[in-house]
Image (tube, helix red, strand yellow):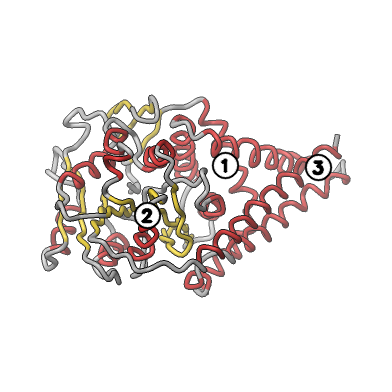
Amino acid sequence: MQTYIIATAYFFFIVELFVISRSFLYTRRERNTKRPDYTPKTAIIAPHYGWDAETEAHVKGLLHQDYAGEYEVFFVTHQRADTGHDVSYPHLCEIAEPHPNVHVLLAPNIVDNNLGRSQKVQNLLTAIEKLPDDIKVIAFVDADVAIREDWLTLLVNPLQEPEIGTTVGGRFYFPQTWNIASLAESIWVNFQMSFQGDHPLTMVWGGSNAFRREMLEKAQILERWEQATIEDLNTTLAMRDIKHKVHFVPDCVAVTHTANRTWHQVIEFTNRQVIMTFHMGLWVQWLASLLVSLPKGICVFGSIPFLFHRRELLPVIFILFLEALSYRLYSKNLPRWLQDMPKVRQAISISSYVTSVGIFLAGFNAVYAVFQRKITWGAVRYEILSATTCRVLGAVKHKRKDSV
């Protein structure tokens, strides 16, 4: 029996190394690809919910993009019955006032107006309705990520290739504290970049992506969003329907700083992501978590209580150290500017020791998603009915700031 346990754990570890190696090859190829300049007039849409000092810094980063073409920024938040608007609205208006290419919009509140879509989707639809006719490319960025000056250039440039329908950047969680929950969450998020590329399974992440405006009609994106919970997974499916690539840009990485995350927050967040993935029909991604992460996690952590009596299981526990090396190896694929930050290197080193916890968490999420359709997101409760439809169940009290 122990032979099968050991073999199972190492088999799935080898699968993990294969995925990382494939990611290295793609990243090298993409970094060596030279394309002509492509700088059409672009709109950046940034939905907002909540406000803090980091959010202000992220907003200001959008105003100084090193982009050779013209671009306009559309910040959009939502109305509230009690105060008239989300707390972010006056701050956004103050920052935007000196900039003629920056606009601040208020979207209707989905709960108050009985609208059958998520608040984020409503915010995006509100902004798209206001776009000038001469906008050729639409880029999207979340409020809780830090981007560099070349973010827009990196996202837009590959869109000159007609077979590329959407470009997507990477998401890197940078834990500021060393509690296990924060570290495990960073592993869970950061490892996902290894699965991205320009292959059919690459997924759009709503926090950093762009597409040509013509895709709104060609891929029927707005029709998919009309009653949807989430926009990015629907954009992924839309590109598959019209056989266009979702193209990962490895040097376009947005950073989220996290601190003092509790297990309740981490499990709620990771469950929400996988519930959406499963019930929107992205079966391969869900199945990968179930078949790779779960068996390996069960073998490793399930063996720990028996080590004192079954020393022959010790090779399974060695997987914990191999996983740490695996995560450090993966980090060598990050953009050089990120690798060169001493605090990032320290965070990767410390996080690596809980790599197995983060991977096992993905397996747990995959099982939980089968039995749950309801999520809480941005202080609103939703039930996911299908890829393109949801039911808004109403507002909930939510003390912590939630990303949009």
Residue 68 against residue 193 in the figure, above or below? below
| Nearer to the camera, 220 or 53 | 220
Residue 110 position in % (x across, y down): 21, 34
- Mark whose residue sits in front, 3 or 2: 2
Viewer can see residue 180: no
Which label is found at residue 7? Answer: 3
Q: Where is residue 72 in the image (x, y as percent from the top left)?
A: 20, 60
**Disc 2 residue type?**
Ser
For residue 364, side relative to residue 3 (left or right)? left
Amino acid at pointer 3: Ala
1 or 3: mark nearer the eye: 3
The quarter holding residue 346 reads bottom right
Q: Which amino acid does label 1 sit on?
A: Ala
**Cα distance in 3D space between marks 1 and 3:** 21 Å
Q: Is residue 224 rendered to the left or right of residue 339?
A: left
Q: Is residue 355 above or below residue 235?
A: below
- Tell me the element at label 1: helix
Indicate the position of residue 8 as horizontal and vertical percent values. Answer: 77, 40
- How crowded is the residue under tag 1: few (<14 C-alpha within 10 Å), some, or many (20+)? many
- Percent of width and height locating residue 67: 29, 69
| Quarter occupied by the N terminus | top right
Q: Name the residue under label 1.
A: 362
Secondary element at tag 3: helix
Q: On the rendered structure, is 293 left or right of 41?
A: right
Q: Earlier in the sequence, mark 3 or mark 2?
A: 3
Element carrying mark 2 = strand
